Amino acid sequence: MTMHADAPASDIESPYAWLRLVAAVTLSTVGGVGMWSVVVALPAIQADFGVDRAAAALPYTLAMIAFGGGGIVTGRLADRFGVALPLMLGTLALALGYLAAGHAASLTQVALAHALIGLGCSATFGPLMADISHWFSRRRGIAVAIAASGNYLAGTIWPPVVQHFIASDGWRSTHNGIGLFLLAAMLPIILLLRRRIREHHSDAAGAPRLQVAPVSPAALQTLLCIAGVACCVAMSMPQVHLVAYCGDLGYGPARGAEMLSLMLGFGIVSRVGSGYIADRIGGVRTLLLGSVLQGVALFLYLLFNGLTSLYVISALFGLFQGGIVPSYAIIIREYFPAREAGTRVGVLLLATLIGMALGGWMSGLVFDLTGSYQAAFLNGLGWNLINVSIMSFLLLRARRRPALA
């Protein structure tokens, strides 16, 4: 039995394409548990093994590293064989990782299990964004943005669910339950995605949007990766340190957690809205707009630190930045052929994850050196300016490409 069947050009923007988008969002939301459960389970795992907080964070670190590297591998598989194969392998890796974590006898085993979880989770983000871009032309931007929203929906839905079962049944039983649930829930949905759009149909559908690269393909990919690192260093400052910042200001960590949740909720709105905008002005302009507005929100953090102000600014930050990462996938489809989308999106997502990791650490270092988060916000603004500069350069150099045959 073949993993996929070729679909005709008439399937682009068809009812099946929208059904496929619903399936993609569902898979991203369900499989996205791998990004969030480890954060919720961290205190219970720490208490179980009697280790310090840094050691207990090792599973999270390995999960994020595997998620970033796995995005390239699963993206490459999607380019060659269609998205169903990496999704099936990812689901198996997720289930095996959760079951292994639930039966782990040491923290090292838990950490290694989370590397499997991160690898499996990677198949439910970048490859799905790249795949859905092949099935839409006029509405490609909003389709990609909706697919990317599954990751944020997972962050909204899964943490309270995971916390409830950890409190009632323990973290081991919870992990075992998640593993079995993922197998039952995801595999049937993946069968809906076995069809694969023919490459020349996908490229032809996107031809009016394809642009001639202002530099060589390798240089363009490099510039986009630098931009991805830079924007996410800036993005990570409030996302990683907002709870601690509120604690330093005397508002307490609970207030910071509420602000973070508010930011994430508005990020979903931003992702869908940015896709709508990208369909009208293109991915580069949309990313530039988001980066400029992200800089504005970071600057507002420098000016205001009242409780109400921080709630408002956090909502604005989520509204401004949520569409940035999906815009990279849209840009890839505007500059590169369809057959390269999964791999190139995976590389870019790895760059953004490096930016998040670097930014979270760097902001903490700047705080340690200065005793204030003001300098950390300024550092974020500086990195954000790099992203704005690269997008401005690409926008100035971009030209329209003739339609593909």
Image (cartoon, grey):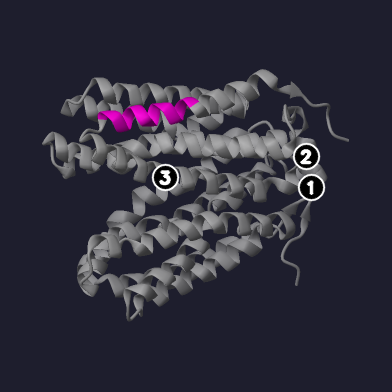
Residue at horizontal 32%, vertical 81%?
A: 105
Query: 331 or 350, which lies in front?
Result: 350
Residue tagged by mark 1?
199
Left/right of residue 369 with respect to residue 148 in the rendered view: left
Residue 381: within the magenta?
yes
**Disc 3 to disc 1, how far (Cα)?**
36 Å
The nearer-to-camera label among 3 and 1 is 3
Residue 91: within the magenta?
no
Span of residues in magenta: 374-385
Residue at horizontal 42%, vertical 38%?
A: 233
Q: Which mark is residue 30?
A: none
At which x and y percent is residue 170?
24, 72
- Residue type at numbered disc 3: Leu
The answer to which of marks 3 and 2 sits earlier in the sequence is 2
Residue at horizontal 71%, vertical 40%?
A: 218
**Disc 2 to disc 1, how far (Cα)?**
6 Å
- Residue type at numbered disc 1: Glu
The extreme front residue here reads 369
Left/right of residue 231 with respect to residue 57 in the rendered view: right
**Depicted 32 relative to depicted 248: above or below:** below
Residue tagged by mark 2?
203
Query: 124 or 22, which lies in front?
Result: 124
* Marks 2 & 1, CB-CB < 8 Å contact: yes
- Residue type at numbered disc 2: Asp
Label 3: few (<14), some (14–19) or many (≥20) C-alpha neighbours in 10 Å? some
Question: Of helix, strand and loop, which mostly describes the magenta segment?
Answer: helix
Label 1: few (<14), some (14–19) or many (≥20) C-alpha neighbours in 10 Å? some
Which SS class for mark 2?
helix
Q: Can I make out residue 176 in this image?
A: no
Residue tagged by mark 3?
358
